[in-house]
């Protein structure tokens, strides 16, 4: 099982890796080796799938892989290679009017492609996801469309492959499915049941399935539900690494698993491990239990993979330096620690940019201590002259929101200039909660090359800081005072205004944090919030401590005023989000191409208005 890191957009490199693993598999006397979905081109490629030269290159790579299976007899084996790729048909068009393309799987043995019972020398993905970042129907022709075109049922052409091993004179019938084909609960047909009915003895699923919180538990249940119907062993092979859609850098954890015919897990690959692992089917197998790591460790690992995936796309990536505006706050502190862990402290520069007496001595001290603890270069660059010059030029007064915005923009101009000078990149340290409510300046702190925390709630930031101290570095690199301090903006004279949101912290959730997750990840709306509030179930739904809502809002009117304030902020700040920088995707949904938004007016439903009247009366 090839749980390998697929480099999206580089079919030649992926083909070299696949062929190298084929040769090693021959030496190990392997019978079948499986690589993930889209192992040749990569999966998340945008409209690169419309490039005919790119598609032609993939077809050449497919031939090279098939040819690499020849001469396996030298190793006393008839190795079967199964790999995910694109198969094109120049003689036919897709529904976009271009060369027809299939998200396909090829089986090859002894230099030839194998044929299934339907007379096809490849098989095609049946169920095409069209949600989140997936857009299969935009580019590919599904098995469902192919069956409709041929005037037959899907079951007639979704057929297994019979593979024969000469040295032992045995044959096995393999049912091949691709990723979404196993997630059939929301579809009207089941590829798994069809393959069973057609004689499959073993189901093999090739996937390119992103990591998300509690994903393994959900997948285990989906597979067990299918096995309960078909009673066949099930092999799941997924890739690792990171791919992106231009806005979201998406983590793949592998999770390669084998399930017995009774639904028990009988093999588990290490998560996030680029590896090729062997398994031998015998009469009996010990049932295994999946041991999940802590939520915060999984979150950190996913962010680290996504951030590393971004850095891999950067020209001269081995030499790049990362420039971070370090304020003494939790978000920038986490950025410094993260990049020091990934790249080493010598490639990270922390820049503190105070303005007059607006910044407290304690935050400036914490910024310096953080960098000292990590061995990161620390610079202080006051922005007084820059801010005052721009404010004077356009007549902006201190204390106004416009003056705050100038401070934010001048800080990012400073970071951009330093990054250019050192041949580096500068980060955006904004978190999910702030981005959701537009609590940042466009052209200012919402600017940068990459936003590692784009999909992390403010409460996650505290948990991650504590995790890095305890587990990553094994010592206090992020000062305790940074973790304990209430958030503040330090944009006004003789004082620091706290953020107008209820964030969580280590050990407890915050209302506005959980509001963001509810709206984005679970598509909740103001009507839903009022219903839950009226029913007394909102705290349970948002996983808040009992009595938390009443502490924040003394009356129903207070609750409604805050809800409408936040909803107007959320809807009204879309124009900032659509201009935001790319970042890590590590939750069930994230801003970017995973969560598609239009710039629209704020609208409350008629039902919302009825509920509001009921509560206020």
Image (spheres, helix red, strand yellow):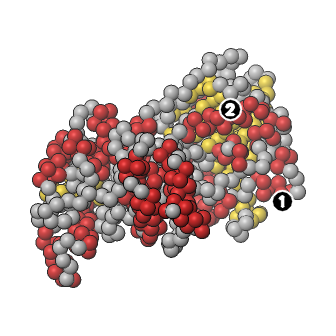
Residue at mark 2: 224
Element at label 1: helix
Residue at mark 1: 149
Q: Position of residue 188 (x, y in %)?
A: 78, 49
Query: Residue 32: which quarter of the image?
Result: top right
At a point 30% along the width and 51% down the height, the residue shown is 331
The reply to whether residue 541 is in sight is yes
The disc at residue 534 is none
Query: Residue 337: which quarter of the image?
Result: top left
For marks 1 and 2, give the one nearer the viewer: 2
Q: Position of residue 591 (x, y in %)?
A: 47, 59
Mark 1 Cα-neighbour bin, 10 Å: few <14, some 14–19, many ≥20? few
In this view, which residue lies farthest toward the front? Answer: 617
133 and 1: which one is in front? Answer: 133
Q: CA distance from mark 1 to mark 2?
A: 33 Å
Q: Position of residue 579 (x, y in %)?
A: 42, 68
């Amino acid at each position: 099982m090839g749980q390998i890191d697929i480099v999206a957009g580089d079919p030649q490199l992926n083909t070299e890796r696949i062929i190298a693993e084929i040769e090693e598999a021959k030496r190990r006397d392997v019978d079948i080796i499986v690589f993930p979905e889209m192992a040749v081109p990569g999966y998340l490629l945008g409209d690169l799938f419309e490039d005919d030269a790119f598609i032609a290159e993939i077809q050449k790579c497919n031939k090279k892989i098939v040819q690499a299976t020849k001469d396996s007899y030298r190793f006393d084996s008839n190795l079967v290679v199964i790999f995910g790729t694109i198969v094109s048909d120049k003689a036919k068009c897709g529904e976009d009017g271009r060369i027809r393309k299939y998200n396909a799987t090829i089986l090859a043995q002894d230099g030839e492609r194998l044929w299934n019972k339907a007379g096809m020398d490849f098989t095609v993905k049946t169920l095409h996801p069209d949600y989140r970042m997936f857009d299969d129907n935009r580019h590919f022709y599904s098995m469902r469309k192919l069956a409709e075109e041929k005037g037959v049922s899907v079951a007639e052409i979704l057929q297994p492959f019979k593979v024969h091993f000469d040295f032992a004179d045995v044959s096995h019938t393999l049912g091949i499915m691709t990723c979404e084909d196993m997630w059939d609960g929301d579809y009207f047909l089941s590829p798994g049941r069809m393959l069973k009915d057609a004689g499959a003895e073993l189901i093999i699923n090739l996937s390119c399935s992103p990591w998300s919180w509690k994903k393994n538990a959900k997948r285990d249940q989906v597979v067990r539900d299918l096995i309960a119907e078909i009673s066949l062993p099930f092999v799941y092979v997924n890739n690792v690494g990171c791919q992106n859609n231009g806005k979201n850098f998406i983590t793949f954890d592998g999770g390669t698993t084998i399930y017995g015919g009774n639904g028990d897990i009988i093999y588990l690959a290490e998560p996030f491990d680029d590896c090729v692992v062997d398994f031998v089917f015998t009469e009996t197998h010990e049932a295994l239990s999946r041991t999940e790591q802590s939520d915060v460790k999984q979150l950190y690992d996913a962010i680290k993979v996504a951030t590393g995936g971004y850095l891999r796309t950067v020209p001269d990536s081995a030499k790049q330096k990362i420039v971070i505006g370090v304020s003494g706050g939790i978000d920038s502190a986490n950025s410094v620690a993260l990049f020091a862990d990934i790249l080493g402290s010598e490639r990270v520069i922390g820049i503190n940019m105070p303005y007059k007496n607006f910044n407290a001595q304690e935050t400036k001290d914490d910024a310096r201590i953080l960098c000292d603890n990590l061995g990161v270069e620390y610079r202080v660059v006051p922005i007084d002259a820059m801010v005052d010059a721009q404010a004077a030029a356009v007549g902006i007064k201190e204390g106004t929101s416009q003056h705050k915005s100038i401070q934010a923009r001048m800080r990012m101009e400073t970071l951009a200039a330093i990054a250019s000078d050192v041949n580096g990149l500068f980060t955006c340290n904004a978190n999910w909660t702030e981005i959701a409510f537009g609590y940042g300046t466009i052209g200012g702190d919402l600017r940068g090359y990459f936003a590692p925390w784009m999909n992390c709630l403010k409460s996650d930031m505290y948990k991650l800081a504590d995790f890095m101290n305890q587990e990553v570095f094994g010592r206090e690199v992020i000062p305790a005072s940074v973790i304990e301090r209430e958030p503040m903006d330090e944009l006004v004279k003789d004082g620091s205004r706290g953020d107008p949101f209820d964030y969580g912290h280590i050990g407890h959730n915050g209302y506005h944090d959980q509001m963001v997750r509810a709206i984005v990840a679970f598509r909740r709306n103001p009507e839903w919030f009022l219903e839950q509030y009226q029913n007394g179930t909102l705290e349970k739904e948002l996983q808040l401590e009992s009595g938390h809502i009443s502490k924040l809002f003394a009356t129903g009117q207070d609750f409604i005023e805050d809800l409408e304030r936040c909803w107007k902020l959320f809807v009204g700040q879309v124009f900032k989000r659509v201009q935001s920088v790319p970042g890590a995707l590590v939750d069930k949904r994230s801003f970017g191409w995973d969560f598609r938004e239009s710039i629209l007016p704020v609208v409350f439903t008629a039902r919302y208005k009825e509920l509001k009247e009921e509560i206020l009366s």
